[in-house]
Image (cartoon, rainbow, N blue to C red):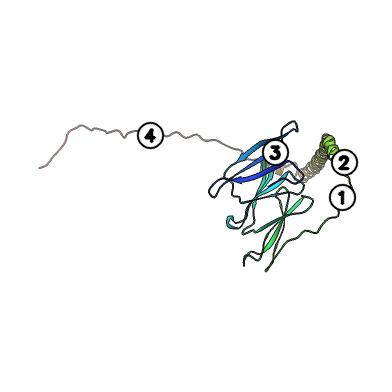
Amino acid sequence: AWEPKGHRMAIIHGDGARPSVSFYSMRDDKGNPKVCKLGTFPNKQANALFWSPAGRHLIIAGLKGLNGQLEFFDADALETMATGEHFMATDIDWDSTGRFVATSVTSVHQMENGFIMWSFSGQQLYKVQKDRFYQFLWRPRPPSLLTKEDEKKAVRLVKQNAKRYEEEDELIKRGQDQELMEDRVELMRKFYAFLDANREARELTEARRKDMRGGYDSGEELETAVETIQMEEQIGEPSEEIVTGPWNSHF
């Protein structure tokens, strides 16, 4: 399967129920025309490959007899982003932007008819069960108003500004952490103020109670004393006492 809008291809090869998937590029690291192997990934439950229309991302799928095993793969990083399953899935359809993809079970099967919508990275977004489901089609999108050069420029700007965006996100996060810390400090201040206010009221009440009882402090009754008692017990073999003396026996 060839990558749309790209220079890579992926193939499924091997014998048995778990073949391998290999990726190739038609360019070398310097951009010169050359067939280069990017990597091989063995033991995949796969019988079909579905590239995103935008390139880079694809689904390594095991449809029909493999019960809808799905692996969402990033060809740039050569790593799996997520795995999923749509039991008995028969079809996979990407939307034209490459942001979303739908897996479906059509009326080829009498059971489990319906579809599931996923993000490109493998997050399940929506699921519908529908009897006699025949086909899933995405609405066509109008052509972009940007030229090819504008699109390339936008991609370059995103890469250039990525660090700045990360720094701005970090500043926002620090500000949120600072607000949380200030809220906690304010709660602690109110708590200790509450303790101080009630401590003064308690001391005043105790003084009045003591005056009413002629100097007797009932709070002393609440005081408890802890006494530790140590007991020793000697454990040993019993001793045998022998008594000697005159004996009077009658036979």
Residue pictured at 61% horizontal, 39% vertical: 40
Work out how far the residue at label 3 is from the one at label 1, CA to CA, in angstroms: 27 Å
Q: Amino acid at mark 2?
A: Glu
Under circle 4, the secondary element is: loop
Callout in the foreground (4, 1): 1
Residue pictured at 70% horizontal, 47% vertical: 58
Q: Amino acid at mark 1?
A: Ser
Work out how far the residue at label 2 is from the one at label 4, CA to CA, in angstroms: 97 Å
Work out how far the residue at label 2 is from the one at label 3, CA to CA, in angstroms: 23 Å
Q: Earlier in the sequence, mark 3 or mark 1?
A: 3
Under circle 3, the secondary element is: strand
Work out how far the residue at label 1 is from the one at label 2, CA to CA, in angstroms: 12 Å
Residue pictured at 67% horizontal, 39% vertical: 24
Residue pictured at 79% horizontal, 52% vertical: 96
| Residue with the mark numbered 3 | 25
Under circle 1, the secondary element is: loop
Under circle 2, the secondary element is: helix
Callout in the foreground (2, 4): 2
Callout in the foreground (4, 3): 3
Q: Position of residue 82 (x, y in %)?
A: 67, 47
Instruction: Please state which of residues 205 and 163 is positioned toward the viewer in this rendering.
Output: 163
| Residue with the mark numbered 1 | 144
Residue 169, visible in the rendered structure: yes
Mark 3 surroundings: few (<14), some (14-19) or many (≥20) residues within 10 A = many
